[in-house]
Image (tube, rainbow, N blue to C red):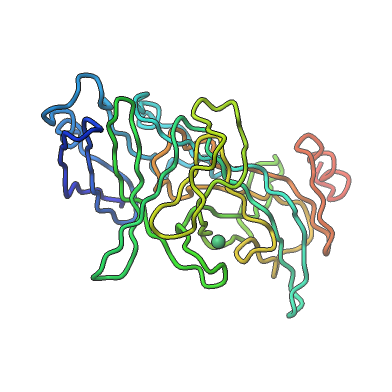
Amino acid sequence: MLNLRAVGIFASSSARCLVLSFALAASLGNFSISPGLAASALNVPHAPAGSLPTTIVAPPDPESLDQDGLMQPTPRSSSISSRLMLPDLRTLPPGDLEIVILPNGSRELRLSNTIWNSGAGALELEGEINPRTRMTRVVQNVHARAGAELEHLVGEFVWHPTHDHWHFAGFSIYELWTLAPTGALDEIVSSSDKVSYCVIDTDIIDRQNQGFEPRRGYYGCGRALQGLSAGWGDTYKSFLDGQEIHLAGVEDGFYALKSTTNPDASLLEANYSNNAALLYLSIQGTRLELVAPEALAERRCSENGWC
Ligand SMILES: [Zn+2]
């Protein structure tokens, strides 16, 4: 269960008019927030009329995965207030795919991966060092129109020893799936660990995004502030540590490669159903071939006899 507990709500009549801070203590599992908490936020004195979200929306229950493991929109996620300028995280189809042989003779699949933000607002991650535990917990700042701001505890920054900088933990995951005769995803045969990222603006993906700014908003891999601006993407190249799926024990054949950002739905975003990218692959030894979805049935029929 991801039980959320409000440990502090305060109002400030600063230049930003009103700041609501929700420091939310969380543990793994389902996310819930009490209607009473949301209601109390709306009753904070000095709140400009109409400036606050009318609903505070939790991520979907991870158990709402469909058969392909993709998040399905839920009544909760569809009721997100339009006043919150939420990010919307998506994954581009992975690139630079190659199979390499490791010194021990086993194979691994390497990939470049880009996560981008198609939402109305930035993904902003602010680190707060706990001097007692020396951990750096991460708070997501979500801005709202009319100057309100919501802060939500989302995880940790962790030191990456080979990248030599700070990462946000659990930003993505890469999975290799077998395919059922229908072509639907069947079983995971190999997976990366949850992949941590230094979350910064590296690539412009969508200049047409209403919140797009041509200057990079987030560019440092420290533990004070990371983020992903609207319309920008964050690419991790295939040669970097962590950009692999081990293929030990994986037979040659047809597979689906699925790359999913925000896999635990820990980050607040506008839409949880568009976080994954899917590619179909043919793996033969060290030979890797992308297979178009419309060609998959014919290829499996002619090569595997699955007709
Ligand atoms: Zn890194």
Residue 123 occupies which quadrant of the picture? top left
- Name the residue: 80% across, 52% down: 282
Ligand 1 located in image quadrant = bottom right
Q: Residue furthest bottom?
A: 104
- Name the residue: 59% across, 60% down: 191
- 190 vs 147: above or below: below
Nearer-the-camera pick, 177 or 274: 274
Image spot of residue 130 (x, y percent): 27, 65
Nearer-the-camera pick, 272 or 88: 88
Q: Residue furthest right?
A: 302
Residue 292 occupies which quadrant of the picture? top right
- Name the residue: 78% across, 55% down: 253
Image spot of residue 49 (x, y percent): 20, 19
Q: Is residue 88 left or right of residue 224?
A: right
Image spot of residue 303 (x, y percent): 87, 49
Q: Residue furthest left?
A: 45
